[in-house]
Image (cartoon, rainbow, N blue to C red):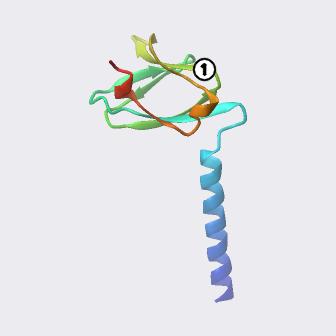
Amino acid sequence: MNKTIQMLALVVALTTTTLLVAFKAPQGEVCIKVKNDTGASVTLHTGKGTAPMNSGAAKDFCMEEKSKLYFADKGQKGKLIVEFTADMNKKVIKLSDYKK
């Protein structure tokens, strides 16, 4: 019985640690969640590459402060969506608010 409790405590500790690490941004980076609620598939441009998003999908983006996220237009930067600032960390961005 004692070994079962110890094993359960270990599993809980590892799970908690994994979750905390997954949501912690590296120092100097800002992480936001982007939800594609536009009803269509879109492609975003991070300044370094593109990231396709299906309709209804959500993705986490962690970028350095002052980095910018754009809609992609034929693989190039299109309309600016947002510039990453420290106060945005862990916020949720809905693409429908920027697609206008």
| The C terminus, quarter of image | top left
Q: Is residue 93 left or right of residue 61?
A: left
Q: Is residue 95 left or right of residue 68?
A: left
Q: Amino acid at mark 1?
A: Ser
Between 16 and 4, which is closer to the camera in this rendering?
16
Query: Residue 38, how many percent across, how many down?
Result: 30, 28
Q: Residue furthest front?
A: 87
Looking at the image, which residue is at 41% across and 26% down? 52
Query: Residue 33, how many percent across, how many down?
Result: 49, 37
Looking at the image, which residue is at 61% across and 26% down? 85
Looking at the image, which residue is at 36% across and 32% down? 36
Q: Which residue, given by chain and number where applicable, does mark 1 sit on? A: 67
Quarter of the image where one finds residue 57: top left
Disc 1 is placed on an element classified as loop
Q: Is residue 13 left or right of residue 60?
A: right
| The N terminus, quarter of image | bottom right
Q: Is residue 14 left or right of residue 40?
A: right
Query: Residue 93, how many percent across, how many down?
Result: 45, 32
Is 50 drawn above or below residue 9 in the view shown?
Answer: above
Between 97 and 23, which is closer to the camera in this rendering?
97
Labels in figure, total: 1
Looking at the image, which residue is at 59% across and 36% down? 89
Query: Residue 9, how many percent across, how many down?
Result: 65, 74
